[in-house]
Image (cartoon, helix red, strand yellow):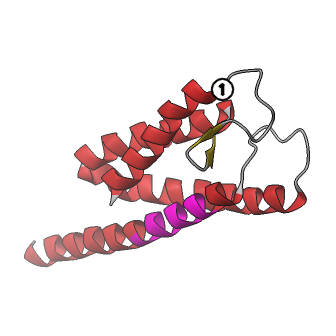
């Protein structure tokens, strides 16, 4: 699940850098149906790279999951307010497709975070019992 989250955001982030011509109007910079702005592409690329690292180092999965959950819950809340008001000058320029993606990502990160925390606690309790 972490690898899936990482790959989706890494692909969207990297592709987004190619759809940022200055001549485009606000809202026309998109990768498929998702917004492509400089700030959003950096966020997605960083989340993707960190996810790849976490996927290959299982001890980092709980920390990554909770980080993604908190970050994307906040980004979803900001996006809902931003898309609902349709204000000009928004640096992130989120649309409803982005909000759904970020909400689903936050939910999946929560599920992975809770599951990985439970697994690590079970391992710790078994280690204590064996000592």
Q: Secondary structure at mark 1?
A: loop
Q: Is residue 110 magenta?
A: yes
Q: Is 128 left or right of 53, judged from the image as shown?
A: left
Q: Residue 100's image quarter? A: bottom right
Q: Which residue is mark 1?
A: 20
Against 26, residue 22 (above or below) is above
Q: Is 107 left or right of 120, judged from the image as shown?
A: right
Q: For the magenta stretch, what is the residue range?
A: 100-111
Predominant SS along the magenta part: helix
Q: Position of residue 111 (x, y in %)?
A: 42, 72
Which of the two residues, 69 or 62, is positioned nearer the viewer here? 69
Which of the two residues, 86 or 50, is positioned nearer the viewer here? 86
Looking at the image, can residue 68 be seen? yes
Q: Is 115 left or right of 9, judged from the image as shown?
A: left
Q: Position of residue 10 (x, y in %)?
A: 44, 39
Quadrant including the N terminus:
bottom left
The residue under the point 52% across, 37% down is 13
The residue under the point 58% across, 39% down is 43
Q: Is 6 left or right of 39, judged from the image as shown?
A: left
Q: Position of residue 83 (x, y in %)?
A: 80, 57
Q: Is residue 46 magenta?
A: no
Q: Position of residue 54 (x, y in %)?
A: 32, 46
Against 122, residue 87 (above or below) is above
Quadrant including the C terminus:
bottom left
Mark 1, Cα crowd under 10 Å, few <14 / some 14-19 / many 20+, is some
Q: How many marks?
A: 1
Q: Residue 25's image quarter? A: top right
Looking at the image, can residue 70 be seen? no
Against 81, residue 43 (above or below) is above
């Amino acid at each position: 699940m972490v690898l899936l989250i990482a790959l989706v955001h890494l692909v969207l982030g990297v592709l987004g850098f190619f759809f940022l011509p200055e001549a485009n109007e606000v809202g026309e910079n998109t990768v498929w149906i998702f917004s492509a702005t400089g700030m959003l592409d950096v966020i997605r690329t960083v989340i993707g790279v960190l996810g790849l690292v976490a996927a290959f180092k299982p001890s980092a999965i709980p920390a990554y999951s909770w980080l993604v959950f908190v970050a994307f819950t906040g980004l979803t809340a900001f996006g809902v307010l931003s898309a609902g008001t349709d204000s000009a000058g928004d640096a992130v320029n989120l649309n409803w497709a982005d909000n759904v993606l970020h909400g689903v990502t936050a939910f999946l990160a929560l599920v992975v975070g809770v599951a990985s925390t439970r697994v690590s606690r079970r391992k710790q309790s078994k280690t204590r019992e064996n000592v």
